[in-house]
Each structure stands twice: as structure tokens, then as C-alpha cells.
Image (cartoon, helix red, strand yellow):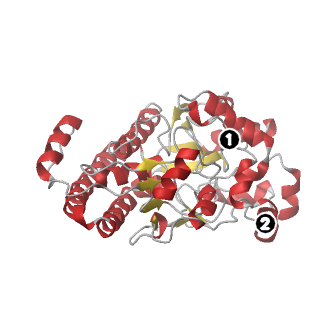
Amino acid sequence: MRIPASSAAFAALLSAALPAAAAEAPVVVTSIAPIHSLVAGIMQGVGEPHLIVKGGGSPHSYSLRPSDAAALEKAAVVFWVGDELEVFLEGPMKSLAGDTKVLSLAEAPNIDLLPFREGGPWAEHDDHGDHDAHGHEDHAHEEHAHSGHGHDDHGHDDHGHEEHGHEEHAEAKHAHEDHAHGEHAHEEHGHEAHADHAHGHAHEHAHEATGHEGHAHGENDMHIWLDPHNARAMATAIAEAMIEADPDNGGVYRANREILLRRLDQLDKEMTSELASVKDKPFIVFHDAYQYMERHFGLNAVGSITVSPERQPGAQRLAEMREKIAELGAVCIFAEPQFEPRLVGVVAEGTQAKTGTLDPLGADLEYGPEMYFSLMRGNAEALRNCLSASS
């Protein structure tokens, strides 16, 4: 069955297809907006899940608000990606009631979980003199110059850097001041992150022992939702968890699951078609968050400006990036709305590369069942527009 494109037509189809809800929904809590969207799709017609990280909040350095803590105390089911992403939830998860069902979607059946990779030939070992002592010489990255397709590479991701202090706090704070969802103030950035998971010295020792900066939690890239196949696997796991937790509404959850799976298949086809003409064009991302999308759609990312989006590279590194962009023939450089866009302009200056914006979390999108589809379509459109303009 073809899913109607308009929201109104979809709502009509959904209303006709769903059985009537039999009972009030249990309290369900979700961590980040893309996961919330998938859960909201499964729960549509029964209830709405609570979302913790809103707006420009960072899932690895967030601090719970009182309303979030209250929701967790009442939760029958909690959905998150896992402790390698939402590190701020580790402590609160341990204090949940014993009958609360917690589902780490990174561990769901049929999830394609990828390891960290280098992210490009300039994957942020810059402007930190002590890194050389740990084997972080810049020349070590040269052999990864074309890592956009080298998905077996192991490297460095953006998670776990909340310990780096005041520069990160200032950068994240700046992003929040510019964002419409400024209600979170800035407590989720900076030193409060230590209270949730006490990583300080353990993180430093892990870095010295392994040479993998910021990987105290593990070695996996947790941006799993950016692959539509993973979204299918998550939708299935979410539905099964809801049916188990709320069997009285099992018929609604099953019907929603089938509709959502069909819509995800259609989304996959649309994006494949939209990106087909630009998939070989080389481009740079702000931070290495898009490996799943790149691999699934065969895209040609050749590097990232930074591994940790909260850490700002210095002037020397920015100059080196411009040289690398010319060397690799990158035609586009993509910023992210949550972080300082000025850096992308600085890197692009003096090169032929154009600029665009990608967003892994959907910071400016309306929350709900449609958000995941808007997020993915928006990123596909941004890629196509910028990469095709270079033809």
C-alpha cells in the first residue's frame, strides 16, 4: 500500500486502520528526539511519550530537569540508544523502580552497529600538545584520506568529551543562546555532567591506555537512527516492548508498527532516489555523526572538521583543513545548527567548497511521529542541494 504524502491523508489512513485504544497508556520516557518520534509513531492513538533532550541539548552532556526526573520515576517503559550516547542517564537509570522496562535500542535485534572510524584525515588531534605523547601525531591520519567509504576504520567519535572544561561549556552555551529552545538554560553543558557519571579521571586514564580519546564508554558509533534499516529494527523492538508492557492496547501497537514499517520503506526509496545523482561527490561534515547514512546510501564523506562538536579547533588546524579540502576535492562543507556555524565559513574561505547544514538530531523540528521523516528528508535535501550545486 502506498503511504499518502500529506500529513492529513496519513492521519485519515491511520484513523481508519487502527483499532480503538482499550486502556490508558502507561508512562513512557524517551531520551532523544529521533527515538521519541519512532516511539510516538508506535503509540499513536494511545498516548504520547515524554521526551528528555529537547532543542539543542547534547545527549552526552545533558542534565535532567525536575520534570524529566519525575517522568522517569513514573515510567513503565524507558527507551534510549544506550550508555555510549546518553551518558547522563546512567545514574538515573540505576535508581528506576525494579518493574520499569528499559530498552537500549542499540542492543535491539537486527541493529547494524558500526564501530568508530577516523572520520577523515584531520580527525581532531589538534591544538592539544599532550596528544603527541599518546601517539596522536597528525601524520597518522594521512592514510585515512578517503575514509568516507572505509567503514571498517576504527577511530574517534564525538561522545564523551564533556569533561574538557570551559571552552566546551562556552561553545554549547552559545548554541543554546541562539536556539529557540533556550528553556534548558545551560546546565546540561559543562561540569554538571560529572555529577551524573563521574568520568573525570577514569576518562583520562582510558585515553592514556587506549589512545581513543573520549571512548571511556565503548567503541561503537551510536548514531544508529540515521540508517533507515536500523529505524525499522528499532520500530519493531519498540512495538514489541509496548505490547508486552501494555497488552490491552497491543492491537493498536501492532497496527502502528505495520504502518510505520511501510512508511520507513517508502522513505528509504525516496532518499535513495534523491541522493543517487550526488552520492559520489566528496564532502566534509562538521563532526563525524553521519557514518550510518553515508554507508546506507553510498555517500562520499571524506572527513570531519571535529570529532567532538563541543571542542573548537585552532587557527593552525583550520588552515590545514583548507589545504586538505583542496587536496581531496571536497565540494561541500556541512555545518550543524546546534553548534557554531562560523567555523564552517572559516574553513570554506579561500576554497571552492560550498556550505550547507546537516542535523543528526533535528534540533529545530517539531516533536512527534512525523519528526523522524522530516529529519531524514531534510538531511537528504541538504545533501542534494549542496552537492548538486557543485556540478
Say what secondary structure mark 2 lies in: helix
Pointer 1: residues within 10 angstroms few (<14), some, or many (20+)?
A: some
Say what secondary structure mark 1 lies in: loop
Callout 2 touching callout 1 (CB < 8 Å):
no
Q: Quadrant of the C terminus?
A: top left
Q: Look at the image and tell me whether residue 66 can be seen.
A: yes
Label 2 to label 1: alpha-carbon separation: 23 Å
Which three-letter amino acid code belongs to the residue tagged 2?
A: Ala
Which three-letter amino acid code belongs to the residue tagged 1?
A: Glu
Give left or right: position of 296 versus 222: left
The residue shown at (48%, 65%) is 106
Pointer 2: residues within 10 angstroms few (<14), some, or many (20+)?
A: few
Residue that label 2 marks: 202
Q: Position of residue 302 (x, y in %)?
A: 58, 49
Q: Nearer the viewer, residue 235 or 343?
A: 235
Residue that label 1 marks: 187
Q: Position of residue 164 (x, y in %)?
A: 78, 49
